[in-house]
Image: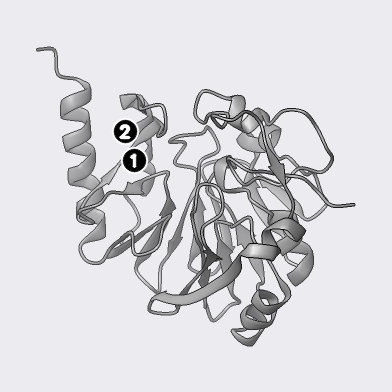
Amino acid sequence: MEHPICATCGVQYGAPRPDCPICEDERQYVGWDGQRWTTLAELRADHRGRVAEEGPDVVGIGAEPGVAIGQRALLLRAPSGNVLWDMTAYLDDDMVRQVNDLGGVSAIAISHPHFYGSMIEWAHAFDAPVYIHEADRRWVARPDDSVVYWTGDTHELADGLTLINAGVHFDGGQVLHWRDARALFSGDILTVVNDRDWVSFMYSYPNHIPERPRIVRRALRLLEPYDFDRVYGAWWRKIVHTDGKEAVRRSAVRYLSFALDDE
């Protein structure tokens, strides 16, 4: 069976259906031409994979042209085993070969539901578990035994690789800290903005709904114990290259100063 992929958000579903609940949620939107579907077979006809370096021991993985939201995944080449952070809707045999040449995938973790993409296809291709926070279980569009749900504020994937439930954007919104690389992988839970020295926090990006101040403050508290220089956002080259922890702190101060302005 060809599993359907929502053309707007790029999430693959386990069976045909008339609607995409992820797009019907107020944090996303249904395409202007109505709900449309595609499949991996259709995408392979006019797309190809893109695999390119994004940083030290970090390889970007996506598609050309971009699919749906257009985010890219990141392969973290860690000594304990490669971790695929975030997800793309696209996958073909050449991408599998290239990723295997880089050491394969030991584990997958995804920041939030808009980026679930074809995660089960990737999990099966590399025999890798997918780590999702329990708070976002309801959004998993293709249930599968490869999905591992975790609870609490943090979860250790391996030595020095920690998932943190920042809770921004979605209740289960998670970021990944890589201690030895001094890097934070944030997707758009903490989105790297265009000047790349700052990040921002939103409940809904396409509908311009700001995140609640208490949620931003909680995320900052959870991140406080972790040091990092780089912050990797969700799209190609959206990276804070230096002083990342301070960039997140001052970005939160700026954000909260506007969110709480009474004038």
Q: Give the percent coordinates (x, y) of residue 211.
A: 36, 28
Q: Give the percent coordinates (x, y) of residue 132.
A: 63, 47
In the image, is 232 to the left or to the right of 121? Answer: left
- Quadrant of image for the C terminus: top left
* Residue at x 73%, y 75% (from the top left corner): 93
Task: Kindly identify the amino acid type of the residue bearing the numbered disc 1.
Answer: Arg
Q: Which mark is residue 5?
A: none
Q: Which residue is mark 2?
A: 217
In the image, is 38 to the left or to the right of 224? Answer: right
- Choose between 235 and 144: the one closer to the eye: 235
Q: Which mark is residue 221?
A: 1
The Cα atoms of the two marked residues, 1 and 2, are separated by 6 Å
- Choose between 144 and 196: the one closer to the eye: 196
Question: Pointers 1 and 2 in contact (CB under 8 A)?
Answer: yes
SS of the residue at dot 1? helix
* Callout 2 crowding tier (Cα within 10 Å): few <14, some 14–19, many ≥20: some
Task: Kindly identify the amino acid type of the residue bearing the numbered disc 2.
Answer: Arg
Q: Give the percent coordinates (x, y) of residue 30.
A: 58, 29
* Residue at x 68%, y 55% (from the top left corner): 119
